[in-house]
Image (tube, rainbow, N blue to C red):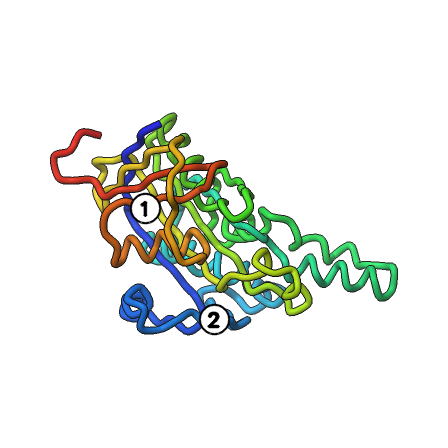
Amino acid sequence: MRSSLAILRRAAWAPGIEGEAGWADWAAGSIAIEASSAVPDLPFLPPLFKRRLGQLDRMVLLVGHEALGAERPAGPKAAARTLLATRRGELGQQWKISAALAETGEVSPAAFSLSVFNAPISLLSIAEVNKGSSCATHAGEHSFAAGLCCCAGMLARDPEPVLLIAADELAPEAYAELGPEAKGAPHALTLLLGRGGSGGEELVLEAGTAGPEAAGGEPEALAFFRWLLAGEGELRLGGEEWPIALTRARPGSPR
């Protein structure tokens, strides 16, 4: 499958990275994302809405707002389809539930409300009054590649833009002994994607052919963002399960 995609708008947040200049320094290797439970402030939301939110929720709400809400006019908002790609989901909330069960044998039903994989984008839909469809995809370490493939398929069927959000929070310390599965810098990246030719940064996605992947061992969304900001040539992600190759579209190239 070959798809031409346009990044109409993008936003990213991670602990220790400040603004576009900070991300440029990160892409160049000058600074690193902090392994921290720090969260964005979300000044555009009321305190009562934010009080029970974890790191993943807050990161998703910020980057989603910047892509959908920050520049949108007051009044009714256009619906936008949204897809969340996450490897671990609400791991912090899930840990609290597991710890409570282990310690007391009981857990409050209220604890489950923010423990499912689609909780962050459901909160985003509420916060942005977004009535578009939403879904979450989990494909382990290749969740971002799977998300890109899903968005390409959605755009092939319907040209209306799709918001892809890739995010994972800092894993609780209790999971550290699990090794690579529990590692990975906390981050959130959002891409408002349209069909090729609709403006913005143009990419070509080739799916279905496995090959050597990007080196470094960082989460796929971060490998993609580093390549987008500072990389050249082709980027391969997805392993054998969701193999994709990404290149920048050349002016005048066929879509």
* 110 shown above or below 37: above
Q: Is residue 74 visible?
A: no
The kind of residue on which mark 1 rests is Leu
> Where is the N terminus found, in terms of image quarters?
top left
- Given this view, does label 1 or label 2 mark the residue nearer the observer? 1
Badge 1: residue crowd in 10 Å (few <14, some 14–19, many ≥20): many
- Between 72 and 187, the one nearer to me in the picture: 187
- Residue visible at 71% across and 53% down in the picture: 112
Residue tagged 2: 41
The kind of residue on which mark 2 rests is Asp
102 with respect to 254 (left or right): right
- Indicate the secondary structure of the residue bearing disc 1: strand
- Between 168 and 63, the one nearer to me in the picture: 168
- Residue visible at 35% across and 46% down in the picture: 192
Label 1 or label 2, whichever comes before in sequence order: 2
Residue 35 point in image, percent of width and height: 51, 71
Q: Is residue 160 visible?
A: yes
* 157 shown above or below 203: above
Find residue 235 and name its label: 1
